[in-house]
Structure formats: C-alpha cells, structure tokens
Amino acid sequence: MPLPEPKKFAHTVVHHTQTALHHAQKINPRRVLRFAIWIALFGGIAGALILAILVAIVSSQLPDPDKLTDRVVAQSTKIYDRTGTHLLYEIFSNERRTLVELEEIPTYAVYATIAIEDKKFFEHRGVRWVSVVRAGVSNLLGRKEGSGGASTITQQLVKNAIVGNKRTLIRKIKEAVLATKIEKTYTKNQILKLYFNEIAYGSSNYGIEAASQAYFGKTVHDITLAEAATLAALPKAPTRYLNNHEALRARRDYVLEAMADQGYITSEQAQTAQQIPLELKARLANIEAPHFVLYVKERLTERFGEKIVETGGLTVITTLDYDLQKIAEEEVKKGGEYNAKNNNASNAALVAIDPKTGAVIAMVGSRDYFDDEIDGQVNVALRLRQPGSSFKPFVYLAGFERGYTPTTVLYDTVTNFAAGGKPYIPHNYDAKEHGPVTVRKALQGSLNIPAVKMLYLAGVHNVLNLAGRLGYTTFTNPDNYGLALVLGGAEVKLLEHTGGYATLANQGKRFPITTILEVKDHGGSTLFKYEVPTAEQAVAEEQAAKISAILSDDAARAYVFGAGGALTLPGRPVAAKTGTTNDYKDGWTMGYTPSLAAGVWVGNNDNKVMKPGVGGTAGAAPIWHAFMNRALEGKPVESFPPMPEIKTRKPILNGMDAGGVPVKIDRISGKLATEDTPEEVTQEVIFMQPHSILHYINKDDPTGPAPVNPAADPQYAGWEAGVRVWIEKKQKEMEEKGEERTFILGDAPTEFDDVHKKELRPSLTVITPQSGATLRERIIDAQVDVSASRGVARVAYFLDGAIIGEATNHPFALHYENREWENGQHTLLVKAYDDVSNMTSVEISFSLDAAPEPPNVTWVSPKPNNTIFASLFPLQLEMHLFKKDNVQSVKIFVHREGDDARTLIGETNAITDTVLMTWNSIPQAGTYILEPKLTLKDGSTISGSENNITVRE
C-alpha cells in the first residue's frame, strides 16, 4: 500500500488535534509537543525502513554492472561507395550508432559535456545523493523529476543503457544504486567512453560519433570547439533544440561559458567559438543515392536477414561509383526538370553498368527522391515499363542466331500481319515507307515494319529465350506475346534492360548484375566478398559484334534521325538505340561503349501521356548523351569489333533482292555503261520482279533450300501484297516527279552507252603555265585552248591533286593566288568536260621559286563577308597562322565601317598554327572590320588579312 503524501498526512494530524481541543476543556501543551515528536520519529523510522526495504528489493533485481560492456548494442549498418570512403547511408532499426574510442574524441568535446552535464564528475562516486533525495520528494509530491536536480553522467549512462527513463521512484533508486556500482566497477574514463557511445543526440543518432556524422558530416575526431559545444548542448532536450536552432545556439553559447568558467578553455576561446554561425546538416541529407541504397538494402536483407542488416553494424562496400552517381543525378535532374516544363514528362531515371563486371555504378530512380508530387521515392529503374523500339536490337539478334544477316533485305512497306482475324497494320515513326532495306538500315532507322517481320522470322519464343539468357525476368508468360513484342508490347525493368545492353557491350559475355562488393560484420570479419565470376557467353561474340556495329553506325541512321546528335559522342565510338511507346507514355535511350553501358527512361510515374512527338530521341537522349559524355571524359577511346564478313548462297541474305539483277547503266542514255562511261554518270540499278523474303526462304531455315510452296506460309499473302502495292505506288511517284530510279520493274537493257566515246572527248591544250616553267610569284594565270564536238561545259583545275577552281565560260581561264604556297616542284591537272561528262585531262609540271612571304593569317571562322546574328555572341574567332615561327604575338582589333575608333578584342602570345580568340561584347547591328596585327620577333608589326562581317539582330 503506497505511503500517503506528506501534505495529506500532516493535514489529517492537524484536523484530529483541532477536534480534540474542541471537545476537551483543557489540554496540556507539553503533551501535544511530545505527541508531535513521537509522530515525527515514527514517520522517519518508518520511512527509512521502507526506503531500505525498497533499496534491498531493487538491488536484488539489478543486472550485473560488470556486464555493461558486454551488452549487445544495436549498431548501424553502413553502406559505402566502391572506394569505401563515401558513406551513402546508415541502416538502423531505431538507433543510428557508431562506436568510438574515448581517445578519438577531442578533449574539449569531453570537457564540454562535463561542464554542462556534471561538473563534479571527477569528484562524486556516481550519485549526488542530495539530488536523489530531492528527486524522490518531488516524485512523492507529484512534481516532475527534473525539479529534483540533474543526474550525474554515470546516472545518465545507466538511464540510457539499462533502466530506461520512466519517471518513477523505483527507477530512480535503481539508477542510483547501479550508478554507485558502476563507479566501483569502471574507471572514470571507461564511464565516459560508455557515455559517449550511448547517449541520445536526437534524430535516432546515438553516440557522439553518429551525431557528428549526421549533423556536421564529419567524424568526431575532426569537430571544432563550437561543434563540440553544440553536441554537448543537445542531450538535455534533443528534439526541442533540433527544431529550434535559436535555442540551440543559446545553449551552445552557455556551454562555452561554462567551459570558460570551469577553466577548460579561455574566455577568448569561448567568445571566438560563440561568433561562429550554427550550421547543422539537414537530417535528410544523410542518405546519398537513395534509390540505389534501398535496392542494396533489399539485397542485403535477402542474404543476411532483416535483424542483422538493421542492428548488426555491418560495413557494406557497394559497386557505386560516387563521382558517376553525382553526374547521373545532376543530368537526370537537369533533363527531368526540362522535360517537366516543356514536354509534360515529370520524371526520369538512369542506370549505368560496367559491362566487364556487371557492377551497377550509378542508379537514379527518379529526378528527385524527395519530391512527393512525382512519386520520387518510387524507383522507376525497378518498375515495369514498355521499352518501345529499344527492344528491337534483341529481336534482330535472335534473327542473326537463326541465320539472318545484317544485309538481309526486308521490304519496309505497309503490311497487314493479321493473317486472318483482326488487322494488325503497324506504321513507322515517320509514317513513311522505305521499300527494300537491309536489316542494318532498318535497325538503325528504327523502322517498325521490318522489325515486326524480323520478329516473325526469328520466332517469338526464340526472342524470349534470348531475353532470358540476357537476364530479363519479366517475360513470364511466353504464350501471351505476339508480333507487337518488338515494338515494346511487353514490359521490362530499366535495370535489366541496361544489363542486356551491357552484355552486347561485352561481346555477348554476360555477368550477373551486382551491387555489393564486400560485407563485413562489426568486428571486421568478412561475411561476403564479391568475386567476379566467369562470364556466361549468353550470345556468340560474332552475333553481338553485328549489333554493336549497327548501333554504332551513325551514318546508317542519318536517313531518319540525321547525322550526329545526342546518340553520338565526339571522337568516341558508341552504340545507341532509342525507344518510344506508341502512346508516348515511355521514352528510352539505351547505349554503350565497351566499358560503360547506360540506360535512360523518361515519362510519368502515373502513366500520363507525354507531349506528342517527345520520346526517346527528344526526351531521354539528351540526358543519356550528357551523362555518357561527362562519365567518359578523360577515359581511353575504345572501339567495337568490326562487322563480321558474312556471305551466304542466298542473294536475299546478301543484300540483294533475289528477284532483281543489279547492273550499271549510263544515266544519260539509260543504256548499259561501258569503259568509256564516266564514273559520275554511272549508276547501279536493280531490274526486278519483286517479292518479299518469304518467297525465297523458309523462315525456320533461312540458309536452307527455298520453299517449294512459299504461299503456304500464313504471312506470305500479306507480305506480298504490301510489296506489290508499294512498288506500283513508288513507280508512279517517281514518274510524276521525274526522279532517278534505283530500281526498275522489268528486264535490264541490252544496248550499250553510245554517247560516251573516245572520239567525242574534248580537245585540250594548256597554254600557260608551260610544262617545266619556273614561277617567280605565288600566282597562277592558267590559259587553255579547248574545244569539243558537243561544246565545252566546264574546265576544272587541280593543283597538286586539290581542286583550286573551275571555269564555265570561254576562254575557261583561271587566276589563282596562295601566300602559303611553298617553293619547289608542283603539278597542275586540267580537266575539260562536255555536256554529258565526256572528259579529257592534261597534266603539267612546273616549279615555284618565289621570294619569302611575310607571316599572315587566313580566316577560318567567321568566313570573310559573312553575316553573323547577335544571338551567336560571344563569338569564337579562328584563324590559321602562316609562317608562325617568325611571330611573337597576335592581336585582333575591330572597328565599325566608317568609324576609325578601334577596339582590342584580344591578344595571345601562344603561337600555334591555329589562333583562337573570343569576341565577348555584343555589337550593334552593322558592318565591322576585323584587323589582325602581328608582332614579329624582331619587334616590328605587320597587318594581317582583314575580315569584313555584318552583324544582324
């Protein structure tokens, strides 16, 4: 039964005394005093007896303080990048904790805590009993524990590590008794070590090292005096102070004052530290590469279990390349924000893999993990999305394994693939038909119709089997996929999709995708160490080389996408493929070099449609290009294996429509070309009776015998109809436009070219310069005597093999000057043509012996007399410097036409063949003269060739 509260007990005594006085006529005062003394004595003895009994009971139930250092303390699992130097995240259950030795904590950090929490720490034996009694009385009176007085550091350790912080008298007694025992068991330094590894600093940070990392981004060994005082200020009320930095700074400054008052630091040191602004890292900033980290955590949990990962204090070295991850995050954020503003695509994701190990070196699952509006915490790299045309390379790869070739001819013509039932008529991205195209051209142009044909030829099940070998896990029901598979009708994960492309980059050798290199327990013992396994040859090297050769051939895709652009990298071979779903919900760019594979997805997490026309090329490719360009900067340039030479006995597989005969004809006469037909008017044309590929091959055995009855193939009729309709339409279009035909329906001509004959070639004589002549100036005044039965159309002049001019009017002369022309022997080749390109040529030799020319410049950019728009400024100026060895410096001045005031644009003493300067100021519209001034090594100055340009708004 609990003791009555002292106030209530006293009130009862007084009440009964008053009643007795009321009823008694006369009370002896001495008797009242004796009665009060006995009551007080009895109460004191009873209280002491009860307290002794409580202490005895509590003491018998206490844990052994000798076991305190053996107590299992939950420790954070730390996840690092591949170098082990960048901490990405700490996984913890309810606590983030890192154990640290007392010697690693700066002395002033220890004294800061002692000064504010327990200034008599080195004098007491664990408990200040006055404070304990005061706290007990406060508890009995119903007051808060804090009003009874502060606990010692030892008591705080006991409260945090063993008995908890429940506000009861029993807990306070336990705390005091255990604190006393601990003081007898451990030294003061041992107690301090335990304290600094146990105390709570807020936000699940337990221990001073974890707090230092979380709030200052550094180990406790490196914190400053001001930071040490800040940490010492937190344990009293961590949540309050973390949410009120003004209050925290005030308490920090109070800690510094206490340190100075107690002699741990000087007043000057305290005042200096108090002037330092309070800066804590944002608590959310202690996770780097969040999507990657959480993916790694999932892998760890699968291997070691939840409890070990949460509390085991593991050290995990991952595959992440920290620098590339930062580049990826920056480019995804930049491109994602642009797409959100301009293309109605709110999100983006990127994965990068090392093809030679399978290691994930960058993973960005969304443009902003912390943006709830775009579901930023969803890792799109692991979500199922339709890949669009980015899956096509694997369909063609499966075809190559079946015997088809990059030169196989497929007709890109509108075709109904239904073969009965509901029509299935896909169209190309550009809504055009391109007629007979090779597989190489079809893949790089991302043509849909040939891709569907190749899927049929290769076989859906064969394609899915290949996907399984490449590591795709999402094609779970093969019977559900039809010919739309090649256009992205199924779903893939960006991570696995990038892994598929990484296998192509590694010449068909596949490594399992991995994210973890090493795991150690809290004692430093290795639990797991990644050993690069022997790669699986998922695809034959020869077949992978074909795909790489096609995807890295920028010229092959130029007819659809144009040359250059975001799918190329300057000076570096790179294979790339885009993809866009028909409904514009997903855009992809996938690509690789031999050492880096990367994939980018753009779109909306909620499957909303992007802006029409935006997809892989416009939305994803800029992000991919920017990442790859930065990631590979300074890295060695690597090349892909060359396209294997493939020859079969099937013309349709060798790049020729088997129904056509390629012949060379003369464009002028339309007849067969002869040895006299000039090359520039010779054209190769196919005369054909066209058929689809199914007319010539058995799709299941393309290199085997031709089918006896090709019409038996269920797709034959539809493919043939598509070819026939296109040929008829194309012939009509070409006739209406008067275009040159590359193929002709019908038989090849039998007559030979009769307009190009030796006797019809022009007559040509070079009058000047004469053969063997010596020229004294760097000038050629060429004169010829020329005639032709059909008339002279033009005369072309070539100096030392390079064309220097062409004359189209009588007398067909040429004037040529070149200051950089070197003395010595030279040749002049003159070619005369008639109107049908009959040609005669004469070559003469002569020598040049001219006086030395002074140094000068030739303008490369801008070209003389060009018009430049003001929006192009700052403008790069480029000149070629002639005879640079005599030049000491180059200056460029500019003045406006009609104004003699000259302005210096720039000066350089770095003399090379190419002079570069930047015109920074943006001039007003008008005509300007650029004047180079060359200072020679003898101190003299000469003018270079001027450049007149016009600036427009």
Image: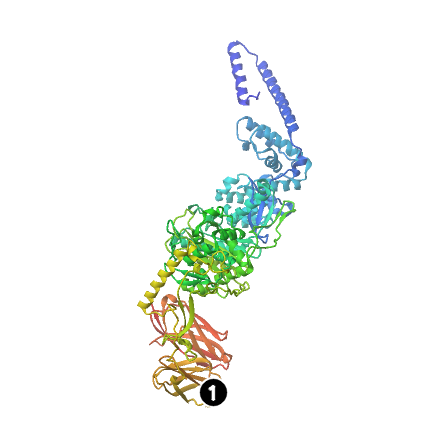
| Quadrant in the picture for the N terminus | top right
Q: Can see residue 327?
A: no
Report the amino acid beneath label 1: Ser
Q: Residue furthest left?
A: 736
Looking at the rendering, which quadrant does residue 925 occupy?
Answer: bottom left
In the image, residue 96 lies at what x, y percent?
56, 43
How packed is label 1: few (under 14 Cα within 10 Å), some, or many (20 or more)? some
Front residue of 41/502: it is 502
Q: Residue furthest front?
A: 708
| Quadrant in the picture for the C terminus | bottom left
Looking at the rendering, which quadrant does residue 802 occupy?
Answer: bottom left
Front residue of 884/346: it is 346
Asked which secondary structure carries label 1, the reply is: strand
Drawn side of residue 561 relative to residue 155, left or right: left
Looking at the rendering, which quadrant does residue 778 occupy?
Answer: bottom left
Residue 306 vertical placement versus 818 (above, below): above
Front residue of 580/880: it is 580
Drawn side of residue 703 relative to residue 788, left or right: right
Residue 873 vertical placement versus 506 (above, below): below
Count of numbered badges drawn on the protein: 1
Residue 150 vertical placement versus 894 (above, below): above
In the image, residue 807 lies at what x, y percent?
37, 82
In the image, residue 709 lies at what x, y percent?
44, 57
Residue 45 vertical placement versus 686 (above, below): above
Q: Can see residue 90?
A: yes
The residue under label 1 is: 845
- Colour mode? rainbow
In the image, residue 472 lies at what x, y percent?
51, 50
